[in-house]
Amino acid sequence: MNLPRFQLLGPSTLKEALSLMTTYGEKVRVLAGGTEITGRLKHRLLSPPCILSLKKVKGLGGIKQKKDDLVVGAATTLTDLAESRIVAHLSKSVSDAARHVAAPAIRNMATLGGNLLQENRCLYYNQSELPRKRLGPCYKLGGATCHAARGLNRCFSVYQGDTASALIAVGAKVRLQNSRAVRTLPVEELFTGKGTNPLSIGRGELLTEIIIPVSPQRTASAYRRFAMRGSIDYPLASAAAFLTVGKDDTIDRARIVMGACGSGPRIAQEAANMIKGKRPEDVSDVDVQQAASLAVKGMEAVDNLILPASYRRELAAVMTARALGEALASLREVDHARRA
């Protein structure tokens, strides 16, 4: 499939890029690594008059530690993120999530910002023009029906990004900038929960940095996902867990975040609260399974991906249990080493 015709804009500075985004408004779309937008252009899910490439803009990549934060440029490739020793040491789940995206060739091009801001997916939406025309427009294409859940009056497209769940679990924030102002917000606030318009980033805004807090406490994090072809496909179920141990040797903070479970990542805080207040060694396998079962109760799933919704729910519970179990095992290992 060929790309549609468009004007390519190639700013060399952030200021120039933001100015062009303001000038062109709704007519422009941003290209960073290109792994997300290219497929949508080929399928004619997008046909913008202008594409603004960030390839020549300096200063949008890189990983730095600033006091109690890791600051990651939005144009940092997933390969650089996955191979960073400091990220692996201070935020293992984020490193793991980046490492599991697609195949090496794609990670070499794909950026963290692009992975975060990818569009939702659905079997009925992510098609070429011919099958979409035969089906008729769905809610996501301005129609008045959901082909996956007929009779229900909203879009059920699924957000399948890997890194978002891990970043939300560790309490990361994003920095958004336009030609007039800068704002910082938690990663979870990027997502509206609405399938037709899943991202809260405004027109003219550019995601420039991701800020990952570094906790002084004993912490552990983990990310697990399932895909039909692990090195190529988007996850069909995923989960991230983040735990901290306080001065009394009990878990004083716990967070579980599920991916591929609806129109945005889902924080399963009630499930995470089940293990708070316990020492890591006192959390049993039964506790972990109960937390995982509770986490998937609020999961939204219809038959709009390659696997049935009922099976995806089972997979989500398994991925949640594995992520939580891995984080607990890491805490126990640290505690054992401290006592040795």
Image (cartoon, rainbow, N blue to C red):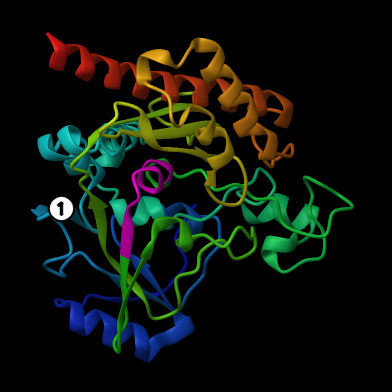
What amino acid is found at the position of numbered circle 1 in the picture?
Asp
Name the spot of residue 240 as percent of width and height, x first: 42, 34
Magenta span: 165-174
At a point 55% along the width and 51% down the height, the residue shown is 264
- Reading the image, the residue beneath label 1 is 68
Is 218 placed left or right of 35 in the picture?
left
The answer to if 281 sits in the magenta stretch is: no
Query: Which residue is situated farthest in the top direction here?
Result: 340
Name the spot of residue 196 as percent of width and height, x first: 64, 63
Q: For mark 1, does the 10 Å Cα neighbourhood hold few (<14), some (14 to 19), or many (20 or more) residues?
A: few
Name the spot of residue 275 as percent of width and height, x first: 48, 27
- 161 or 332: nearer the viewer: 332
Asked whether residue 2 appears in the rendered view, the answer is yes
At a point 46% along the width and 56% down the height, the residue shown is 188
Quarter-wise, where is residue 208 in the image?
Answer: bottom left
Name the spot of residue 87 as percent of width and height, x first: 18, 39
Is 41 placed left or right of 35 in the picture?
right
At a point 22% along the width and 75% down the height, the residue shown is 10
